[in-house]
Amino acid sequence: MFGGPMKPMLPNMQRIAGTLAIPQEAALAPVPREEEKQATSSWGQLRDVIREEMSAALSSVSHSAAARPMQFIINNSAQANVEQAPAPAPAPPPPEKPSTILEGFFRFMESPLNRIFVYGMIGIGLYVLQGHLSHNWRLAEMKRRVDANPMLRLKALLSK
């Protein structure tokens, strides 16, 4: 007749549910005192039956749960950390001092960075020297032109 979340209603539950069922006309009419007591006792019986059914259902669930094997989830992971430090190398012997200045210069020029520095400084020095010599040549040329022109020579004498 009625079904629940666990199983169909048992006959004793059907009997109690049948006594509690109230027709729609009776539900709208005021309930006399005598019927109130009977309904209360019926509800008490229904409560007892529900308790028995729930305890029986829970006990069957707990027995079936104990019979089932438990599932285990195993997270296996392996880690290995290895730290290896090399043995400190012995300190190299200090370099020997050069016996002559020329040998010291050649040792200095063995390094590519030192060579770049020296060649760069020589190039910058030659560029500055060329600018200085060009300036002196222009001044000498201007002085020669002034000395060759009589008007410019007169102006130079008056301005002194």
Image (cartoon, rainbow, N blue to C red):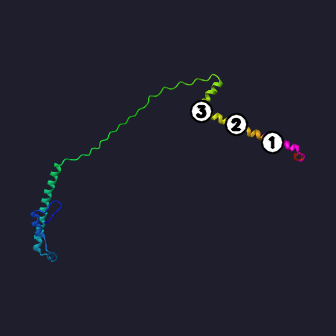
The image shows residue 74 at horizontal and vertical percentages of 27, 44
> For the point 10% across and 70% down, which residue is it?
38
From the viewer's perspective, is 133 left or right of 67? right
Query: Would residue 145 be counted in the magenta stretch?
Result: yes
Nearer to us in this view, 27 or 142: 142
Crowdedness of circle 3 by 10 Å Cα count: few (<14), some, many (20+)?
few
Q: Which residue is mark 1?
A: 139
The image shows residue 132 at horizontal and vertical percentages of 75, 39
> For the point 17% across and 51% down, which residue is it?
65
> For the point 11% across and 69% down, which residue is it?
18
Q: Which quarter shows the C terminus? A: top right
Q: Which mark is residue 47?
A: none
SS assignment for the magenta stretch, majority: helix
Q: Which residue is mark 2?
A: 125
Disc 3 on helix, strand or loop?
A: helix
Q: Which residue is mark 3?
A: 112
Disc 2 on helix, strand or loop?
A: helix
Residue type, numbered disc 1 = Leu
Crowdedness of circle 1 by 10 Å Cα count: few (<14), some, many (20+)?
few
Residue type, numbered disc 2 = Gly
Magenta span: 136-151
From the viewer's perspective, is 58 left or right of 106? left
The earlier-in-sequence mark between 2 and 1 is 2
- What whole-number distance in Å separates the C-alpha atoms at marks 3 and 1? 41 Å
